Amino acid sequence: MLRPMDLIAALEGVVGSDRVRAHPLDRRVFAKDAGVKDGPVAAVVFPESAEETAGCVRVARAAGVPVVPRGAGTGLAGGAVPIEPSVMVVMTRMNRIVEVDEQSRTAWVGPGVINLDLSRDLASTGLHFAPDPSSQQSCTIGGNVGTNAGGPHCLAEGTTVAHILAVEMVTADGDIVIVGGDHPDPVGLDLRAVVVGSEGTMGVTTRVLVKLTENPPAVRTLLIGFATVEDAAATVSEVIASGLVPAALEMMDRAMVRAVENYVHAGYPTDAAAVLLAEVAGHAVGVDAEADMIARIAADNDATMVRLAQNDAERALLWKGRKSAFGAIAQSAPDYYLHDTVVPRTRLVEVLSQIYEIGERYGIALLNVFHAGDGNLHPLVSFDAAVPGELDRVMAAATEMVRVSIEAGGSLSGEHGIGMEKRDLMGLVFGPDDLDAQARLREAFDPDGVLNPGKILPEGSRCFDRAPTIGAAP
Amino acid sequence: MLRPGADHRGGSVTTLDAATRRLLERLRPESVPPEVGDVPVVAPRRVEEAAEVLAFAGDRGLVVGFVGGGTQLDLGGRIEPDVWVSTAALNRIVDHQVEDLTLVVQAGVPVADVEALLADHAQSAILPETPGAATVGGVVAAGVSGYRRLRYGPTRDRVLEVVLATGYGKVVRAGGRVVKNVTGYDLSRLAVGSMGALGLIGEVCLKLWPIPRGAATVAVDDPEGALAETYRPLAVLETEDGSAVYLTGTPEQVAAQTEELGGVGEPGHRWPDPIDSPMRFSVRVTPRHLAGAVRMIRAAFPEAPLRAQHGVGEVTFGVEACDLERVVAVRHWAEGHGGAMVILAASAGSLPGMDPWGAPPAAHGLQVRVKEAFDPHRICNPGKLPGGL
């Protein structure tokens, strides 16, 4: 067990003194992600290679201090927030696109590469990285791997796990290993499939082999207004049931549309009760027919307006509205809490009305912007955390919203992850044997609780006693 | 058949008592693949029953083999089970949410039945196109994908939920019946291709895709060129009879893409027949090396039937008689190009000294620990996976 100063000196021995920070201000900055909670930081370290990362993990392990991997800190579930004093291993300096194989449509990238930068850098190749979380201007590929991030275009393309072929990572023992591979169906258990989405509890990602997706030759983007949320949701269900697979199918309610329109002036209809942003992408001959079909289904469901983006600039503006939603709500209150649950698409209307009812009952300001095509709901509560009791009220409402989603056959999280935020709600979805199996898996990767302990699984998930996490050792 | 004291791979030295044997005989399903011989076969009707069998086997150190349609029994290390657990009685389609595009199905349901049901709704689970007797559970456990993976991704991308009877005798559910989910560790995807190493996959929920109305198969001379020029075809396949691009979309789009390829389109999708040679191999390389792999295989085995998936990076080929030296040369080439050559089928002893999988995975220590976490008694298909796991 090292004393705090010795820990810092040992980390400096690995990466040099300029890349270890322990000033109270640094500790405060790295104590939280984009969610609402913070935690205790022992030191912050910025490795620049897999070897340095491995050295940091070994030092922390020897010191009995947990490791919490961190990308840009845009996560919303507290996945990168330490629960006990931890070494924050910040991967943002490993931000090189190492190698692009245009013919195989793959690229090895550093975990610190920013999601949108990757697609921008690849523009000349006609390829892009498909997952596009709303935070894509700042979130990192390593963070996307950690949370199995989603985004509007995951409706047609699948979430991050479908776009990750291999992960190089540092294990809890401080070894550098690669899971997955560059050829189809690498032999052995597909560990890559569980490492993606493991929120830094199975390894610290140091390099990622991503699958790249061909840019569509043609895209059509539609903005559709409705007089009721029910009409919009019915349109979503009918579009999916019709056999179309839109590239994206996003919904916003009136409160969100007004906030966004006031913020970016994208021409959203502020008198509509709900707005759909629908996109179809593909061969030039196909997209017009598909856009027509969506417009027809919307008209059959009493759409009050349908607008087809006439050019790339207009399309970009419509998307800017959608992706600025979380910035826009800062106008109404200083803090926000963003939910993330999934329900079967056919139950959208019913669950939404229950969510509105919960919001009313708790007297909270509720806005909705979500991936309707996936049934992935994102009710958003704007509030002021400085008001005593306000956060508790918001969290109590959040738990009720999660419950109604699960009762409708849904799940706890679609793309943000469990982290610490929903850890103690896991029992709503899984029984003791299910949680025990997940705990066994985690233990196989990290028997001593070195990597991001206290996340995802509630206390006591393992059905028989296990050793305390190293951070809890005397 | 059990031989007391015999050196089974799982270390089993137990024999079955007469009463247990009689019970197992009663539970034997009507039809079993010939490969299981006269070893006892149990066919649980519920996943809970499978878990009980595994708990029983774990207590006694009995080695358990899993069997569905019996189409993949040759894949991986050879096992000599004390008892087979068959999915023949796990044969229900549990739930088809047509509008949500999800399907819950028990493991023993044949792939062909599932796809026939879905076709009535213009949907597909994108399972292998020429499945024979393969079951859904078998395809998931063996990690087998169809040709359409170029467009829709491998089978793994469609497994939303699994119910597993683990090697330690519990029923475990993971994932969920929604199309997007990050709730907890993704055991569902881990189960895909796990070859029974974690336990028996009893039930799965699959994500479905709508099948567009337009479909055509267009013969081409240059598959790599066609792949580069065509926007997201379903598949680009090369066989011993030539190459073809498989298109899908609106009828107008398919017509336009057919014209762009300059070929004559045949309506519908004519998938190549499965290779029925007694020895079959799968070469897997990064897509850039696929054409090279085809050339290599053609040079080594000029007569061999082959199925090359351009853009995916897999070539399967069949051989009538053993030619160890050439087979080794193909594996050497594949591994030298960062890939693998897996033996899909071979008669016992025909390829002495050749591991069925080739080079073991890089993170072997983690593989061992995950296997042990789910199968602490090493009773579930022991030795099937690379590295003798």
Image: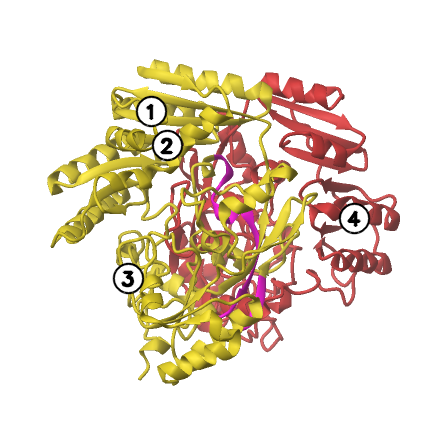
Chain colours: A yellow, B red
Pointer 3 with pointer 2, Cβ within 8 A: no
Specify the subunit that label 2 lies on. Answer: A
In what element is the residue under mark 2? Answer: helix
Q: Nearer the viewer, residue A170 or B333?
A: A170
Q: Residue at x 73, y 24 (%)?
A: B261
The residue that mark 2 highlights is: A321
The residue that mark 3 highlights is: A38
Q: Is residue B222 magenta?
A: no
Q: How many tags in the picture?
A: 4
Q: Residues within 10 Å of mark 3 (few under 14, many from 20)?
A: some
Checking the image for residue B293, the label placed there is: 4
Residue type (three-letter) at the residue carrying disc 3: Asp
Quadrant of the snapshot with the N terminus of chain A: bottom left
- CA distance for labels 2 and 1: 8 Å
Q: Nearer the viewer, residue B72 or A128?
A: A128
Range covered by the magenta-colored residues: A156-178
- CA distance for labels 4 and 1: 53 Å
Marks 2 and 4: which is nearer the front?
2
Quadrant of the snapshot with the C terminus of chain A: bottom left
Residue type (three-letter) at the residue carrying disc 1: Tyr
A142 to the left or right of A394: right
Pointer 4 with pointer 3, Cβ within 8 A: no
